[in-house]
């Protein structure tokens, strides 16, 4: 059964913790391993940084909980953040901690996915 949780916060650094903590809590609800919860938390934070770099009026974050995965969608603004150093760093981290992530410039959305059981459980 799919479940949806949404959050709207101002696109300001002070609200990164709210996004990060909600993601971690939802990872626990979905029975992710400790390593997967940490990856999801990091993905949420870096996704928020990425979204903020595009200067949205409000940062809308949607979580889709499904058996086997947690998906996070971030609404993006219209600003061209291609030259933004924070964006390049967020891009690097997202590629490391997410199982999938895509940016849809036409829909103004960043989509990240963390699958259950893909963390380093060694």
Image (cartoon, helix red, strand yellow):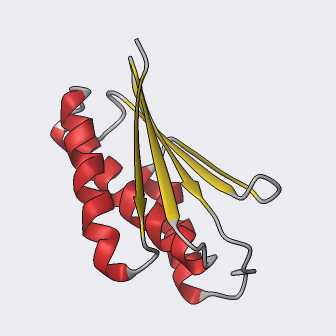
Residue sitting at 29 percent across and 80 percent down?
Answer: 14
Which quarter of the rendered picture does the C terminus lie within?
A: top left
Query: Do we see residue 83 in this rendering?
Result: yes
Where's residue 106, x and y in %? 83, 56
Toward the top, the furthest residue is 1
Residue sitting at 47 percent across and 52 percent down?
Answer: 61
**Residue 103 image-quadrant placement:** bottom right
Where's residue 23, x and y in %? 30, 48
Q: Nearer the viewer, residue 41 or 56?
A: 56
Residue 22 lies, with reference to residue 94, above or below; the image says above
Toward the right, the furthest residue is 106
Query: Do we see residue 121 in this rendering?
Result: no
Which quarter of the rendered picture does the N terminus lie within?
A: top left
Where's residue 4, x and y in %? 42, 31
Where's residue 9, x and y in %? 40, 65
**Residue 45 image-quadrant placement:** bottom left
Residue 24 lies, with reference to residue 89, above or below; the image says above
Relative placement, left or right, of 2 versus 103 is: left
Relative placement, left or right, of 60 versus 105 is: left
The tally of labels here is 0
């Amino acid at each position: 059964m799919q479940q949806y949780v949404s959050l709207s916060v101002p696109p300001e650094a002070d609200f990164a913790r709210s996004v990060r903590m909600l993601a971690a809590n939802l990872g626990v609800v979905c029975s992710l391993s400790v390593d997967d919860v940490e990856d999801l938390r990091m993905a949420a934070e870096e996704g928020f940084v990425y979204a903020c770099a595009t200067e949205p009026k409000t940062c809308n974050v949607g979580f889709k909980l499904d058996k086997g995965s947690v998906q996070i969608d971030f609404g993006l603004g219209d600003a061209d953040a291609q030259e933004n150093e924070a964006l390049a760093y967020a891009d690097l981290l997202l590629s490391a901690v997410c199982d999938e992530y895509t940016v849809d410039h036409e829909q103004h959305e960043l989509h990240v996915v963390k699958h259950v059981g893909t963390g380093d459980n060694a």
